[in-house]
């Protein structure tokens, strides 16, 4: 059920990317889709009554949480922040040049 909610969140982000005409709304859609994927990775590593591998006094590997998806998500958050900053900077430059965030009006302008 939780994976279905991740898919729904991703579909909301994809809808914003494909159907919206405002650049800011497209950027928000990219952020929503990105965090849906991050949530899916974290949920894929979840285990009921799981424990972190760093806190094991004994060498029993049973019921440990996989740390690799968490490390990947931390890296993806940093990369996503940089990507979002770049998208916002490009959107600001487009607004300075064309005076609008609407991509249909930008397409019709010359220059």
Image (cartoon, rainbow, N blue to C red):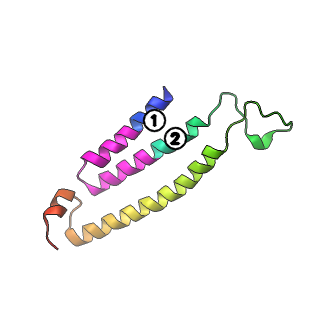
Structural crowding at the residue carrying mark 1, measured as other residues with C-alpha within 10 Å and reported as few (<14), some (14–19) or many (≥20): many
Q: Which residue lies furthest to the right in this view?
A: 58
Circle 1 is placed at which residue position? 6
Q: Residue at coordinates 64% horizontally, 46% vertically from top-left? A: 68
- The kind of secondary structure element at disc 2 is helix
C-alpha span from label 1 to label 2: 7 Å
User: 29 and 69: which one is in front?
Assistant: 69
Structural crowding at the residue carrying mark 2, measured as other residues with C-alpha within 10 Å and reported as few (<14), some (14–19) or many (≥20): some
Count of marks overlaid on the render: 2
Q: Where is residue 16 in the image (x, y as percent from the top left)?
A: 31, 45
Q: Residue at coordinates 25% horizontally, 54% vertically from top-left? A: 22
Determine which quarter of the picture holds residue 104: bottom left
Please say whether residue 32 is one of the residues in the magenta stretch. Answer: yes
Q: Which residue lies furthest to the top in this view?
A: 1
Q: In this view, does 10 lie above or below 22?
A: above
| Quadrant including the C terminus | bottom left
Q: What stretch is highlighted in magenta?
A: 10-34
Are dots 1 and 2 in contact, CB under 8 Å?
yes
């Amino acid at each position: 059920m939780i994976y279905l909610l991740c898919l729904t969140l991703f579909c909301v982000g994809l809808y914003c990317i494909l159907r919206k005409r405002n650049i800011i709304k497209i950027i928000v859609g990219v952020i929503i889709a990105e965090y849906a994927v991050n949530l899916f990775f974290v949920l894929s590593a979840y285990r009921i009554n799981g424990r972190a591998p760093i806190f094991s006094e004994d060498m029993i590997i049973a019921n440990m949480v996989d740390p690799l998806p968490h490390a990947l998500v931390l890296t993806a958050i940093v990369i996503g922040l940089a990507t979002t900053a770049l998208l916002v900077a490009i959107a600001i430059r487009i607004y300075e040049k064309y005076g609008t965030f609407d991509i249909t009006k930008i397409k019709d302008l010359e220059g």
